[in-house]
Image (tube, rainbow, N blue to C red):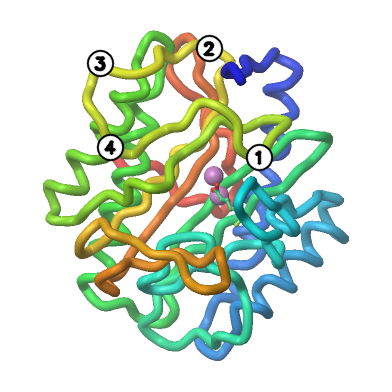
Amino acid sequence: MPVVLKTAEELERMRIAGRLASEVLDFISPHVKPGVSTGKLNDLCHDYMVREQGTVPAPLNYAPPGYKPFPKSICTSVNHQVCHGVPGERVLKPGDILNIDITVIKDGYHGDCSRMFYVGEPSIQAQRLVDVTFECMWLGIRAVRAGARLGDIGAAIQAHAEKHGFSVVREFCGHGIGRKFHEEPQVLHYGKPGTGLTLQPGMTFTVEPMINAGKPGIRELADGWTIVTKDHSLSAQWEHTVAVTEQGYEVLTLSRGAAPAPA
Ligand code: MF3
Ligand code: CO
Ligand code: CO
C-alpha cells in the first residue's frame, strides 16, 4: 500500500481528530495521581470520548495481524513498560511515570498522541528521561518538511537520545495515519540523514519515540500487548500526529493542555 497524500479537506478532518485526541489528554490530566488505577483512567477517558466528544476510541478491539483484539480504549504504560500497556487493576503510586496514549476516530479520521505524566514527585533520573524523550520527539518533528527524508527524522531522534546515554527502541515506530490507524510510511526513530522516503506535502504521520534509560531491548508480556524493557530500565514516550507542509510541518494533535514546544 502506498503512502496516502491528504487533500485540504482531509487535512481539515485530521486537524479535528487530532485536537480531540489531545483534548482527551487534557481531560484526564487532573485524574493522574497516587491511588488511581489505570483501569479507572481508561474508563474516564472512554466515557469522555464516547459521551462528550462523540469519538470512537481506536484501540478498543483493535487487532492488527498476529495480535488479539486490544481490550481497552487507551494505552497506559507505567515505568519500565514501553508502550501498549493494557489498563487494569494497577494502582499508581508516588514516583511512577506513566505514558497515556490516546487515539480517536472522528468523521472517519484518526488522531493519535501521547504524553508522559508524573505521579507525585519524579526521581531526577526519571525526569531527565522524560525531558530528553520530549526533546527527541520535537527534534524529529522539526526535521519534517517537504523534500526532507524519513531518515532525517530518525537520525535527529537517535543522536539526541544517545548523546544523553539513553537508547532508542527499534521494534516500534511512528506511522502514517488517516482513514487507517496505522498506514504507510513507517517512521523509524533511528537512522541516517539523507536516507529513506522523501517527504511530500499532504503526508500525515506520527512521531512517537520510545526511549529507554538502559538498553534498547524489549519483550512482550503474556497479555499479548504490553511491551516492557528487557533490563527493566525506565522507558518514556511522547507522540504527536503531524502533517508535512511546503514550509515544514503542522502538528495536528494540539490543544490547550499540550506542552509547548521546547525553545
Ligand atoms: N496508539 C498506539 C500508537 O501510537 C497504538 C496502540 S495500538 C493498541 O501507534 F491497540 F494498543 F491500542
Ligand atoms: Co501512533
Ligand atoms: Co499512539
Question: Is 57 on the left-hand or right-hand side of 115?
Answer: right
Instruction: Examine the rendered structure and indicate whether residue 16 appears above or below residue 21.
Output: above
| Residue placed under numbered mark 3 in the picture | 194
Instruction: Give neighbour class at mark 1: few <14, some 14-19, many 20+ (Cα, 10 Å).
Output: some
- For the point 27% across and 39% down, the residue is 157
Mark 3 vs ligand 2: CB below 8 Å: no
Give residue 17's position: percent from left, percent from top: 71, 39
Amino acid found under the numbered disc labelled 2: Pro
Looking at the image, which residue is at 37% across and 52% down? Answer: 210
Label 4–label 1 contact, CB within 8 A: no
Q: Amino acid at mark 1?
A: Phe
Q: Is residue 30 left or right of residue 180?
A: left
* Residue on which the image places disc 2: 201
- Residue holding disc 4: 190
Distance between the alpha carbons at the discs numbered 3 and 2: 18 Å
- Badge 1 residue CB within 8 Å of ligand 1: yes
